[in-house]
Image: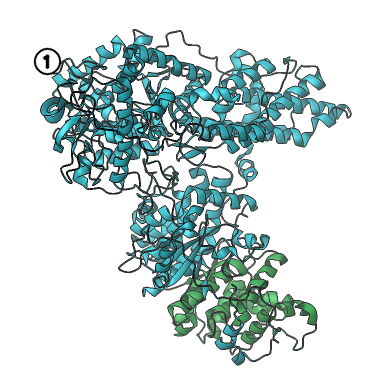
Chain colours: A green, B cyan
C-alpha cells in the first residue's frame, strides 16, 4: 500500500485543503464523523505509526486506537447506538463491514485491488439498501468516507459497471449530514453503456 | 488488497457444485456415513459454520464458538470448494446465520458468538479486534509463511511478528489484568490467541512473561484446546502450506519487521561487519581451520576436551528394524556423532543389541537352537543392516555378556544396600507341569462373569469383559493343559517414590543446562506428576541376568532394569576403562537418542537406578527423542508387509546415502512425519540431483573444463563478498541447529548453501564469460574458484548426513584431509593452483516407474493378510503332550491377537478395575500373528511380530518396554498388583512400541491434541493424563474426524461419533450466482430505495441447487 497515505483523502478534493492539512486524513475523517453524528468537536486526535492509525486522546487512560474503535466510541458518545446495529446479528454485520473497510478498502494498493473491492461490494449491495440490510449504520458512513476518493475517480462507465455501489453511494452522499464538505460525486441517470451487463 | 484470501479469490474460479458435498473432516471416507445420522442434525444446528481446510482463521472461530457455547454446526470445506458467498474469500470461515445471512469476517463471527450470549463489545474489545485485524493478522501470516513455506524455525518465524508480541505484553502489564480486556476472558482473548497459536505453538519461541502466562492459560482452556485439536491437524497444515506456497510472499507491512522473503532476511541480516568478517575469514585460508582430532583407539575422555558420549536406544535382537526405528535412534545418533567428530569433540558412540528375555527363549525353542545361538544369529543381521546404512558406531555390542551381569548385579547390590529395593508378594498362577508362572494369556478357564468355558486369562471372548487371570474359574495352562494353581510369589521392586527426592533436583539441574527435546521433557514431567510407584524389577525367566539375592536366585532382572545397563556393559566390552566414560560426569557429556516411547526409562527409571546406586555415574545430559515416522499414509507393519525394513533397503538399489538423506530430511523432529515414496523421489531429484549434486558438479566441471583442472586465480568483488557472508550465515545457522541436535533443520542450511551457489553461478554465467575478453575471463575464473570452494565446504557439511557422498566430493575435489573439519568460518580451502581430480555426477535421477514399482512392492499385500477364516482350536486335553514349538507359536499368535483386542477395549474406556488387571503382556500386544499356524510357518520370523510393535519409533529398544499395563493408569506396577511378567514375553513393548489398533490409518495430529473425543477406538496414552498444551501428546491417536461436528451448545452436544455424520445441509440461500441465473435487469441508481426492501431482495435470491 502507499505508505502513510490513508485511503480516505478528502483533503485531496480541490478547494477543501485547509481542514485536511490541519488534521491529516484520518483526523479529518473522524472530524467529519463527529459532525455527522452531531457531536461537538472537542476530541483530540493523534496518529500512530507509519500507517497513521488514529488515536483518540482521552482524559483518563491510554486513549483509544484504531478507526473502528474510535468511531464506535463516538457513536456511543452521541447516543446513537442504533448505528452500531440493533440485533446481535446486525451488530456483527456492522462490525464485519467496518473491518472490511479498514482491512480491505484501506489496503488497496493497485487499480486491480480497487476493482476487486468494488466488485465485492457491488455483489453485496445487489439486494440491499444499506450495508447491514435495511438500516443505515456506521458501516455506511465509514464505507462512504473510505470510498469517496475511489468514487471520485471512477469513469462513467465504471460507475455503471458497479451499479449497486453507485446507487448506494449516491444514496449515502445525500443522507443528511454525511457528505458535508466532500465533493458531490455525480452519477448519470440514464445508462449509457447498455451492453455493459 | 493484501490478504491471501482476496488473492485466492481472484485467482480461482470455482464450480458451484462442490460446496454441498457432505464433507467430513479430514478423510473422504467419512462422507459415506449413515444417512440416518445425517437426519439428526437438521433441526439441531441453528447456525452453520463453514471452515476451509487449512485456513488459519479457522482456529479462532472454532475456539470462539466453543468458548461462547454457540450452537453451531461445523463443516469443513475442501480447498477449491467455492465459498457460500462470492464475497467470502474461499479461505475465510463463513457463518451462515439462522436468517440466511452470511458472516465472512472471522472476527465478526467471533464477535457474533459472544453477542448472542449477551456479551456486548466494549471499547477495549473493539480495539483489540481492530488491532488484530489490521496489525496482528498480516504479521502472523508472514510468520506462518516464513515457517511453513521457508521452513524457518518457530523462533525465527515468531520474529516476523515484530512488535505485536511486545504490544500485547505492554498492554497486559499496563492494565494489570489477567486477560486482554479485563479480568475475564472475552472475545478479544480468543481472537488474538487464535491468530497467535499457530505461530507460538513452539515452546522454543521466546515470549515475555505476562504474555506467556496469558497465552498458556488460554491454550489450556477447554475451548481453545479442543479447537486446536479439531482444527490443527497436519493434513490441514499441509493444505494450508500448499495454498500459501501458491501465493506470493506476503508484503511486509510498513512499520513491522515482517521480513519473510528468504532473500530479504538473509540480505538484511548481512551487515557491513558480517561481510567484512566473511572476507577476512576467506583470506585466512586453510591455515585458519583447526587441526582435525583423530582420537586414539579406544576413545577415552581427554582432560580439557569436550568429551561426548552418545548412545542410541538398544534395538531388540529379535526385530528387524524398519526405517522408523533406524531414523528414531541409530541414524539420528550417527548424524550427530559424525557432526560431533567433525567439530573435534572427543566422541564415543555406543550401541548394541538387547538380547535377554522370553521372546528370545521362545524363538530358540522354535528354531531348535539355544537362546545364545539365536542371539548370535540375529545380532549379525542387525550389525549388517547398520553397516549398510554406514552407522559409525565406535562399538556395536550386545547385552548378553559377563560385563552386563557384573555391572547389573553391582548396581542392584548397591541399590539393595541403600534400601531402595522392596520385596513384596504377588499372587500368580503357577503351572506345575511347565514349572513356571503363567502369563495371563497363557491361561484359559471359565469366565467369572458369564461362565463361558473358554475365557482367556485376560478377556472373555463371549461377554468381552476383561479378566484378571487369577479370577478365572478352573484355569488351564494353555501350554500343557495342566491346572495351574494360584501361588504367592515374591518379587523385588525398585522404590521409585523414595528415589524421587534424588531425581527431582537432578532433573531440574539437568533441564536447566541440558538440551532435552520438548517431548522428552513433557513425558518425563507427566510421569512424575502422576506419581512414581515402586516398579517390579524381577521376572520368572531363565534367559536374563540372574538376581544375586537369596530367595530370588531362580529369577532374572526384568528388561527395563537390565537393558539400559547395556550401554555401560557394551562400553565395558569396548574398553576396560569404561568407568572413565560412565563414572565421570565431570568430564563427560551424555547424549541419549531414542524415540519418544523410550523416554521414561531414560529420564526417570534408569537415572533413579544410577542415582540410587550412588557411584558417581554419568547421567544423561541431553535427551533427544524423536516422534514417530509413518509409512506413506499408515504404519510400518511387518506382518502386513507394509513398509521398508532395514534389510530390504539395500535391495531397492537406492544408495544408502540417499536413504540416509531422505530419512534425516523427514526426521520426525518435533512432530510425526511420514516416509513417502513420491516424496523420496521428489527430494532426490530436486534437492540432491538438481540442487546439491548439480552445483557441486558444475563447480568442479568448470575447473576441469575451463581451467585445466587447476583452481583459477580469484579477484573478489563486493558481489562475491556478499556470497561469502551469506554462506557464512547459513554455516552459523547449521552449527546453531546441530548444537541443539536439530538435525533435520540443519540439513536445510546445507541445501540453502548450495542453492546460493547455484544462483551465484547462474547469475554470473562463467560459461559465457570464459569465451569473452580478458576481463570476462578473469571474472569467470573468480566465480569458478569461489564456487568450487563452496563445493569444498559442502563436502564437509554433508558428511554427517551422507558420509559416502561427502567422501566422494572430497576425493573429486582432492580436498586435503586436514580440511575435513568443521569450524564456524568459511575459508578458501582450495587456493588458486590447487588441482582437482576427476569430477563425476554424484546422484542419479529416480524415475517414477521405478518408484511406483517400489511403492507397490513395499505397499503391503504381498504377505498374506492375517485375517483368514478362524481355525478351530479345540482346547487341549489336560495332560496333553508337552508343548511343541508350533503349538507355542500358535498360542502366542492368539495371544497377540487377544492383546490387540484388549487394548481396543481399554482404549474405548473399559472398566478401570478390569483394565487394571491387565498384565503387561497385553499392553505389549505381544507375540506372533493371529491364530494361523500355517501362516506363521511360512512367514519369516519377523512376521511373528504384531504390526503394532513395528510402527515408527525407536521401536526396537527393549529398554522401552513398558512392563505393564498399557493403560492410563500408567505403566506401573505396584507391589499389590500382579507382577506383570513372570508371564509371557512382552514382545510388543519389547519392540518399544505400544501396539496400536490396526484399523484406521493413523492421523498424526500436529498440535498436542487432547485424547480424541470420538471416532475409532483411540489409543490410550500410556502415561500423560491430560494433554499438555505445549507439546505433542506422546502416544496419541486421532481418529479420522467426521466432516461435521457439533460444537457444544448450551447444555448439550458433546460431539460423538454417531452424531458426526455428514449431512446435506439446507441450502445456503444467498444470492444468485452469476452462472446459474440471468442477471437482473440493471437498476438505475435513482430507483427509490423503498422499492428495494427485503421482499424484493428475497425475490431476487434464487436458490442454486
Check the picture and name the quadrant holding the N terminus of chain B: bottom right
At mark 1, the secondary structure is loop
Q: Chain of mark 1?
A: B
Q: Quadrant of residue B318?
A: top left
> Where residue A183 sits: x, y (%)?
69, 83
Which one is nearer the viewer's eye here, B1076 or B484? B484
Check the picture and name the quadrant holding the C terminus of chain B: bottom right
> Where residue B720 sits: x, y (%)?
71, 32
B123 sits to left or right of B469: right
> Where residue B200 sits: x, y (%)?
45, 49
Q: Which residue is mark 1?
A: B550
Which one is nearer the viewer's eye here, B740 or B10? B10
Q: Residue at x 74, y 80 (%)?
A: A160
Q: Residue at x 38, y 29 (%)?
A: B945
Residue B981 visible here? yes
B266 sits to left or right of B488: right
Amino acid at each position: 500500500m502507499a505508505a502513510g497515505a490513508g485511503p480516505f483523502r478528502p483533503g485531496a478534493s480541490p478547494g477543501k485543503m485547509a481542514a485536511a492539512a490541519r488534521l491529516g486524513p484520518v483526523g479529518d475523517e473522524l472530524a467529519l464523523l463527529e459532525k455527522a453524528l452531531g457531536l461537538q468537536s472537542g476530541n483530540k486526535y493523534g496518529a500512530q505509526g507509519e500507517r497513521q492509525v488514529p488515536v483518540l486522546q482521552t482524559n483518563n487512560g491510554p486513549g483509544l486506537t484504531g478507526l473502528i474503535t474510535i468511531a464506535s466510541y463516538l457513536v456511543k458518545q452521541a447516543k446513537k447506538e442504533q448505528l452500531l446495529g440493533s440485533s446481535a446479528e446486525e451488530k456483527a454485520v456492522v462490525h464485519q463491514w467496518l473491518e472490511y473497510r479498514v482491512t480491505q478498502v484501506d489496503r488497496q494498493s493497485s487499480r486491480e485491488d480497487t476493482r476487486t473491492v468494488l466488485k465485492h461490494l457491488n455483489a453485496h449491495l445487489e439486494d440491499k439498501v444499506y450495508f447491514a440490510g435495511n438500516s443505515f449504520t456506521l458501516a455506511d458512513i465509514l464505507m462512504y468516507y473510505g470510498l469517496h476518493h475511489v468514487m471520485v475517480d471512477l469513469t462513467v462507465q465504471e460507475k455503471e459497471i458497479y451499479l449497486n455501489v453507485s446507487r448506494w453511494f449516491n444514496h449515502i452522499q445525500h443522507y443528511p449530514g454525511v457528505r458535508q464538505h466532500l465533493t458531490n460525486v455525480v452519477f448519470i441517470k440514464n445508462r449509457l453503456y447498455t451492453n455493459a451487463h | 488488497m493484501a490478504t491471501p484470501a482476496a488473492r485466492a479469490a481472484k485467482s480461482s474460479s470455482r464450480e458451484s457444485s462442490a460446496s454441498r458435498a457432505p464433507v467430513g473432516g479430514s478423510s473422504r471416507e467419512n462422507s459415506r456415513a449413515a444417512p440416518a445420522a445425517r437426519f439428526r442434525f437438521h433441526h439441531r444446528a441453528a447456525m452453520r459454520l463453514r471452515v476451509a481446510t487449512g485456513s488459519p482463521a479457522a482456529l479462532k472461530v472454532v475456539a470462539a464458538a466453543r468458548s461462547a457455547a454457540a450452537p453451531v454446526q461445523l463443516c469443513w470445506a475442501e480447498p477449491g470448494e467455492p465459498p457460500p458467498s462470492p464475497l467470502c474469500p474461499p479461505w475465510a470461515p463463513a457463518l451462515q446465520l439462522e436468517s440466511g445471512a452470511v458472516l465472512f469476517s472471522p472476527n465478526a463471527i467471533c464477535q457474533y458468538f459472544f453477542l448472542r450470549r449477551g456479551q456486548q463489545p466494549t471499547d477495549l474489545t473493539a480495539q483489540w479486534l481492530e488491532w488484530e485485524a489490521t496489525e496482528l493478522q498480516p504479521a502472523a501470516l508472514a510468520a506462518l509463511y516464513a515457517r511453513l513455506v521457508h521452513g524457518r524455525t518457530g523462533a525465527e518465524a515468531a520474529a516476523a511478528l515484530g512488535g505485536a508480541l511486545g504490544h500485547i505484553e505492554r498492554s497486559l502489564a499496563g492494565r494489570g489484568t489477567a486477560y486482554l480486556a479485563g479480568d475475564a476472558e472475552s472475545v478479544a482473548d480468543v481472537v488474538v490467541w487464535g491468530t497467535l497459536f499457530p505461530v507460538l505453538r513452539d515452546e522454543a519461541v521466546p515470549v515475555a512473561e505476562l504474555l506467556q502466562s496469558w497465552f498458556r492459560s488460554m491454550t489450556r482452556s477447554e475451548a481453545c484446546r479442543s479447537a486446536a485439536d479439531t482444527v490443527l491437524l497436519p493434513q490441514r497444515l499441509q493444505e494450508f502450506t500448499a495454498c500459501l506456497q501458491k501465493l506470493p510472499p506476503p508484503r511486509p507491512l510498513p512499520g513491522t519487521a515482517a521480513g519473510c522473503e528468504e532473500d530479504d532476511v538473509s540480505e538484511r541480516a548481512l551487515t557491513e561487519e558480517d561481510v567484512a568478517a566473511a572476507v577476512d575469514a576467506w583470506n585466512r585460508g586453510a591455515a585458519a581451520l583447526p587441526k582435525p582430532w583423530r582420537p586414539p583407539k579406544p576413545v577415552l575422555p581427554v582432560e580439557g576436551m569436550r568429551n561426548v558420549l552418545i548412545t542410541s536406544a538398544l534395538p531388540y535382537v529379535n526385530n528387524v528394524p524398519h526405517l522408523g526405528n533406524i531414523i528414531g535412534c541409530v541414524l539420528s545418533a550417527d548424524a550427530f556423532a559424525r557432526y560431533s567428530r567433525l567439530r573435534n569433540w572427543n566422541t564415543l558412540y555406543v550401541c548394541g543389541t538387547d538380547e535377554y528375555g522370553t521372546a528370545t527363549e521362545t524363538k530358540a525353542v522354535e528354531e531348535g537352537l539355544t537362546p545364545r545361538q539365536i542371539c548370535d544369529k540375529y545380532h549379525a543381521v542387525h550389525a549388517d543392516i547398520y553397516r549398510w546404512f554406514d552407522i559409525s558406531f565406535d562399538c556395536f555390542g550386545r547385552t548378553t555378556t559377563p560385563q552386563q551381569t557384573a555391572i547389573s548385579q553391582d548396581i542392584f547390590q548397591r541399590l539393595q544396600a541403600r534400601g531402595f529395593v522392596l520385596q513384596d508378594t504377588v499372587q500368580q498362577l503357577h503351572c506345575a507341569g511347565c514349572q513356571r508362572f503363567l502369563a495371563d494369556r497363557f491361561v484359559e478357564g471359565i469366565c467369572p462373569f458369564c461362565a463361558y468355558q473358554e475365557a482367556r486369562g485376560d478377556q472373555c471372548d463371549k461377554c468381552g469383559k476383561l479378566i484378571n487371570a487369577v479370577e478365572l474359574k478352573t484355569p488351564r495352562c494353555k501350554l500343557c493343559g495342566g491346572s495351574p494353581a494360584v501361588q504367592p510369589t515374591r518379587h523385588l521392586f525398585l522404590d521409585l517414590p523414595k528415589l524421587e527426592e534424588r531425581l527431582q533436583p537432578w532433573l531440574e539441574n539437568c533441564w536447566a543446562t541440558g538440551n532435552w527435546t520438548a517431548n522428552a521433557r513433557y513425558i518425563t514431567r507427566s510421569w512424575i506428576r502422576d506419581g512414581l510407584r515402586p516398579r517390579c524389577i524381577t521376572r520368572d525367566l531363565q534367559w536374563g541376568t540372574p538376581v544375586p539375592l537369596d530367595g530370588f536366585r531362580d529369577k532374572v532382572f526384568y528388561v527395563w532394569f537390565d537393558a539400559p545397563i547395556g550401554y555401560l556393559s557394551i562400553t565395558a566390552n569396548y574398553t576396560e576403562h569404561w568407568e572413565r566414560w560412565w563414572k565421570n560426569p565431570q568430564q563427560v557429556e551424555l547424549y541419549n537418542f531414542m524415540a519418544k516411547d523410550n523416554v521414561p526409562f531414560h529420564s526417570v527409571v534408569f537415572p533413579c537406578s544410577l542415582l540410587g546406586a550412588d557411584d558417581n555415574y554419568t547421567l544423561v545430559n541431553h535427551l533427544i527423542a524423536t516422534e514417530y515416522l509413518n509409512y506413506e499414509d499408515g504404519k510400518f507393519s511387518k506382518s502386513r508387509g507394509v513398509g521398508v525394513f532395514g534389510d530390504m533397503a539395500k535391495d531397492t538399489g537406492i544408495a544408502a546415502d540417499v536413504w540416509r538423506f531422505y530419512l534425516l530430511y523427514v526426521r520426525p523432529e518435533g512432530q510425526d512425519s511420514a516416509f513417502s515414496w513420491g516424496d523420496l523421489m521428489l527430494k532426490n531429484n530436486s534437492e540432491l540431483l538438481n540442487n546439491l549434486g548439480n552445483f557441486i558438479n558444475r563447480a568442479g566441471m568448470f575447473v576441469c573444463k575451463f581451467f585445466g583442472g587447476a583452481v583459477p586465480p580469484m579477484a573478489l568483488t563486493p558481489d562475491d563478498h556478499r556470497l561469502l557472508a551469506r554462506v557464512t550465515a547459513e554455516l552459523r545457522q547449521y552449527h546453531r541447529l546441530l548444537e541443539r541436535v536439530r538435525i533435520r533443520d540443519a540439513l536445510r542450511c546445507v541445501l540453502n548453501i548450495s542453492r546460493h551457489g547455484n544462483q551465484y553461478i547462474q547469475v554470473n554465467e562463467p560459461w559465457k564469460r570464459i569465451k569473452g575478453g580478458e576481463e570476462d575471463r578473469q571474472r569467470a575464473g573468480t566465480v569458478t574458484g569461489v564456487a568450487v570452494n563452496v563445493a569444498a565446504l559442502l563436502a564437509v557439511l554433508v558428511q554427517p548426513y551422507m558420509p559416502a557422498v561427502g567422501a566422494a566430493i572430497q576425493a573429486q575435489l582432492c580436498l586435503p584431509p586436514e580440511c575435513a573439519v568443521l569450524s564456524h568460518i568459511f575459508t578458501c580451502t582450495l587456493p588458486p593452483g590447487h588441482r582437482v581430480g576427476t569430477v563425476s555426477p554424484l546422484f542419479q535421477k529416480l524415475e517414477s516407474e521405478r518408484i511406483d514399482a517400489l511403492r507397490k512392492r513395499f505397499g503391503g499385500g504381498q504377505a498374506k493378510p492375517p485375517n483368514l477364516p478362524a481355525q478351530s482350536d479345540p482346547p487341549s486335553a489336560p495332560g496333553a503332550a508337552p508343548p511343541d514349538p508350533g503349538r507355542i507359536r500358535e498360542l502366542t499368535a492368539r495371544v497377540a491377537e487377544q492383546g490387540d483386542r484388549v487394548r481396543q477395549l481399554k482404549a474405548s474406556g473399559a472398566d478401570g478395575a478390569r483394565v487394571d488387571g491387565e498384565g503387561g503382556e497385553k499392553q505389549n500386544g505381544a507375540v506372533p500373528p493371529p491364530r494361523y499356524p500355517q501362516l506363521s510357518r511360512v512367514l519369516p520370523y519377523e512376521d511373528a511380530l504384531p504390526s503394532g510393535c513395528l510402527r515408527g519409533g525407536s521401536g526396537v529398544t527393549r529398554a522401552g518396554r513398558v512392563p505393564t499395563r498399557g493403560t492410563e493408569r500408567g505403566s506401573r506396577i505396584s507391589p499389590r498388583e500382579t507382577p506383570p511378567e513372570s508371564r509371557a514375553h512382552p514382545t510388543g513393548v519389547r519392540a518399544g512400541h505400544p501396539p496400536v489398533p490396526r484399523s484406521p490409518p493413523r492421523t498424526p495430529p500436529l498440535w498436542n491434541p487432547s485424547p480424541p473425543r470420538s471416532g475409532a477406538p483411540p489409543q490410550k496414552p500410556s502415561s500423560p493424563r491430560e494433554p499438555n498444551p505445549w507439546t505433542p501428546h506422546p502416544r496419541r491417536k486421532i481418529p479420522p474426524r467426521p466432516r461435521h461436528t457439533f460444537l457444544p451448545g448450551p447444555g448439550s452436544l458433546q460431539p460423538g461419533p454417531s452424531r458426526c455424520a455428514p449431512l446435506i445441509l439446507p441450502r445456503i440461500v444467498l444470492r444468485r450466482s452469476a452462472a446459474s441465473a440471468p442477471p437482473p435487469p440493471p437498476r438505475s441508481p435513482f430507483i427509490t430505495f423503498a422499492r428495494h426492501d427485503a421482499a424484493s431482495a428475497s425475490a431476487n435470491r434464487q436458490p442454486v441447487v
